[in-house]
Each structure stands twice: as structure tokens, then as C-alpha cells.
Amino acid sequence: MRQAISTVDELLALVAVDRRDLPRLEEPSAFPLRVPLSFVQRMRIATPDDPLLLQVLPLGVETNAVDGFVADPLRETGGDLGPGIISKYRGRTLLITTGACPVHCRYCFRRHFPYSESALRGAMDASLAALATLDHDEIILSGGDPLSLSNSRLERLFEGLCRLPRLRRLRIHTRFPIIVPQRVDQALLELLCRLPVPLTIVTHVNHAQEIDASVAGGMRDLRDAGATLLNQGVLLAGINAMASTQAELAEALFDIGIVPYYLHQLDPVAGAAHFRVDDDQAQTIMAELRASLPGYLVPRLVREIPGETAKTAVA
């Protein structure tokens, strides 16, 4: 992570792309560029429209104000249940474990999130006490990225969560095994093997090009540790908004043991409007997928609506 790329010029030099071949670029400060070398190495050289590059490259268009695109699109801030706790799903509790993430995706719906006020941080005991009062049987670890936490801190968190009387399932939403596959180390695997409750790991892959041999190996190890693997992607203009691209992704995911689960319509976060795909185009893509793939390879097209207790199907 100390070797992660943090400037536009450094990133473009590594992939041999000229600034003149791209729209206006920015060196953002509020949501800075961050992308590890392990992810950069999967980008195509001298390809300005590479789908991995466009997910992380900050463009000047991000500064444009667009109606409906706001800092907190899912209205997640302002809760008072306890440090890091968001209770918006029926029977399930979301725990914001950390603001740290291995990569800064430009469409991230929490790119403006006040992690210093709302993440778990140093208040783990207080959060666990608050969780014990909720009638929920599944805890969802989110962030940032939960696997940004050290193995020792994860172990302490798991021990506390597994003492909750109602806990039946644990879920981890993470991009780490995709962006930095080396994070799936032996100590982490041993820790996951010891969990007394079923574990689901929800990865975030948007394009088949993100999957290489090291990612596949990490997924095999996670499956061997007892985890169920699902994927949630985001439909992104200029990156994966074609049926052929989505079909290739679904096949590639299943080949490494991940079930395509959700395909999200973009959350309307300020700075990401240029990634928007309208519902008509999205539904056309889904119809083509249903016609060409077996049902278990077709993700559900959904969007998240503030105040709803589950994802809403786009139909």
C-alpha cells in the first residue's frame, strides 16, 4: 500500500498514456487518487479508454455540479446507534469498520463520507455494546474496506461480534482481494477458518480484466476457508455498460468461484454523474444477458433507495 500511485502523472507514465488523449484531468485533494501497482499492472498499455484506468482516473468533469448528485446519496450520515453502526436493512446491521481503502474508485458512493465522525475507529467496545441491543442476526462489515484492518484487529472484532447472542451470519464487503490479492495471507485465512458462524464475502469486480491468476488463487483460498463468494458490481458508462462485457464478467467470476449477485445502478454521488447509465439502457443490457446466459450467471439489477430496507429491483 505504501507503493500505491497517488499522482495523475505517475499513473499515466506507468500505462504510457498521454494527457492529450484524455479529457481534462484533475489532481483532487478531497478524494485523492490512490491505486496500487498490482491493479495498475492489469491495465492495458497505451489505452486511454482502458476500463481499469477509467475507474480510478480523476477527471475535471467530477467538479461539475449535477442535479440530484449529492454528497450523501444514501443518507447514511447522522445516525446515533453507535460508532460506525448503520441500521438500514431489516434484520441486518452495517458496520463501518474503517475509512481506509486500497483504491479510490471515482464512482465511490462514500467518497464524501465523514469517516472521522462515523467509522468504528477506536470505539469498538461501544459499538459492540450497541450491536448487542439490536434484534439483527447478520452483521455486514463495510468501509472503506474492512480488510484494511490488521489481522489482529480483525480477530478482536470477530471475537466481539461472535459473542453477540443473535448473530447467525457474518458478511464482509471488500475490494481488497481484487485490488491487492496478497492481502489474502495465511494468517487471514486461519482467522476466517476459526469463525463459528457462516461467512459470506462480497467482492466488487466491475470488469473481467480485473481478474488474473493471483486474484483467482486468493478466491480459491477464501473458498477453502469456508467463505461463500458473491459479487456486486456497478453499471458504469464507458467501462462495462455493454451486454457482452457483462457476460464476459459473469463467466470470469463463476470460473473462479464467485456468484454474480447484484449489478447496481450508480448511486448518485457528487462527482460521479459521468458514469451514469439510464434505466432503459440498463434494462436492454439485462434482457440480452438473460437471453445469452444461464439464470445463475445473471446478476440482479438493483438500486439503493434511501429509507428502503432492501435493495430495489430495477424492472
Image (tube, rainbow, N blue to C red):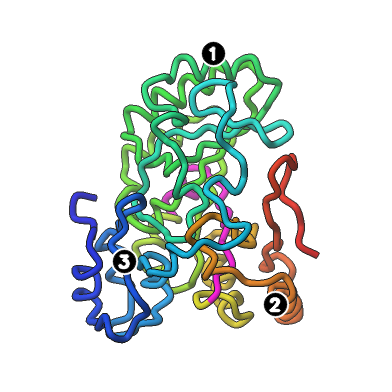
Residue matched to label 2: 281
Say if 34 sits above or below 254 in the image: above
Question: For the magenta stretch, what is the residue range?
Answer: 220-237
**Residue that extends furthest to the right in the rendered view of this protein:** 315
Q: Residue at x 76, y 80 (%)?
A: 291
> In this view of the protein, can residue 260 be seen by the observer?
no
**Helix, strand or loop for disc 3:** loop
- Measure the C-alpha gap from mark 2 to mark 1: 46 Å
The residue at 36%/42% (across/down) is 100
Which of the numbered marks, if any, corresponds to residue 26? 3
Q: State whether residue 75 is above or below residue 213.
A: above
Q: Nearer the viewer, residue 277 or 139?
A: 277
Asked if 163 appears above or below 209 in the picture, the reply is above
Q: Quadrant of the C terminus?
A: bottom right
Q: Position of residue 207 (x, y in %)?
A: 49, 71
Which disc is residue 168 wearing? none
Asked if residue 227 is among those painted magenta in the image, a careful observer would answer: yes
Q: Residues within 10 Å of mark 3 (few under 14, many from 20)?
A: some
Q: Is residue 18 visible?
A: yes
Instruction: Residue 121: name its quadrant.
Output: top left
* Closer to the eye: label 3 or 1: 3
Q: Amino acid at mark 1?
A: Ala
Q: Position of residue 168 (x, y in %)?
A: 65, 28
